[in-house]
Amino acid sequence: MRARDRVAVRVLRATLAALDNAEAVPADEAELRGSAIEQSPVGVGVSEAARRELSERTVADIVQAEAAERLEAAMQLTAPMHADRAAQLRAEAAVLLRFLDGAGGV
């Protein structure tokens, strides 16, 4: 596997995790308080929570934010000993920005 592919895989996994987190629905306060074990529902799928459906615009915004976060971090790494990490962050941002460009800038 080429080094460039590893960079893409790493940043895409992180971005997919960010998208997955954005789809999560906040828990109700009642759910946080808990209830007696005898009153808990039982069966297949009872623990499944509804997920939000993200619009294309929201997905693009999240991907853009992930790229911007990496570029900001790279700019803050000014010491010569951090040059490799800064280059890695810029490469990761470039992967994400290519996806946005390929989608017509959504």
Image (tube, grey):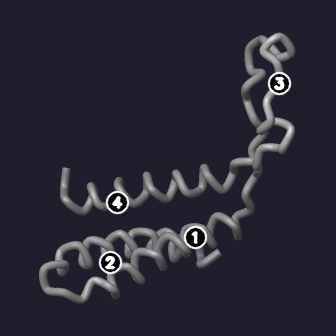
Instruction: Say above or below: 72 vs 30.
Output: below
Disc 1 secondary structure class: loop
Identify residue for label 1: 103
User: Mark 1 or mark 4: which comes first in sequence?
Assistant: 4
The residue indicated by pointer 4 is: 8
Q: Quadrant of residue 95?
A: bottom left
Instruction: Residue at 55% x, 74% y: name it.
Output: 65
Spatial CA span between label 4 and label 3: 44 Å
**Circle 3 sits on which residue?**
35
* Lateral position of residue 3 relative to residue 52, left or right: left
**Amino acid at circle 1:** Ala
**How would you rate the neighbour count of disc 3 (Cα within 10 Å): few for under 14, some for 14-19, many for 20 or more?**
few
Please identify, in this view, whether the residue under mark 1 or under mark 3 is nearer the observer.
Answer: 3
Q: Locate the C terminus and report the quarter of the image it occupies.
A: bottom right
Residues tagged 4 and 2 counted as in contact (Cβ below 8 A) = no
Closer to the observer: label 4 or label 3? 3
In the rendered structure, which disc, 4 or 2, sits on the residue that comes first in sequence? Answer: 4
Query: Under tag 4, what secondary structure?
Result: helix
- Give, as a three-letter code, the residue at label 2: Arg
Q: Residues within 10 Å of mark 2 (few under 14, many from 20)?
A: some
- Measure the alpha-carbon separation of dots 1 and 3: 46 Å
Relative side of 16 to 78, left or right = right
Residue 3 x %, y %: 19, 59
Q: Which residue occupies the extreme left position in the image?
A: 81
What distance separates the C-alpha of mark 2 from that of mark 1? 20 Å
What kind of residue is marked 3?
A: Ser
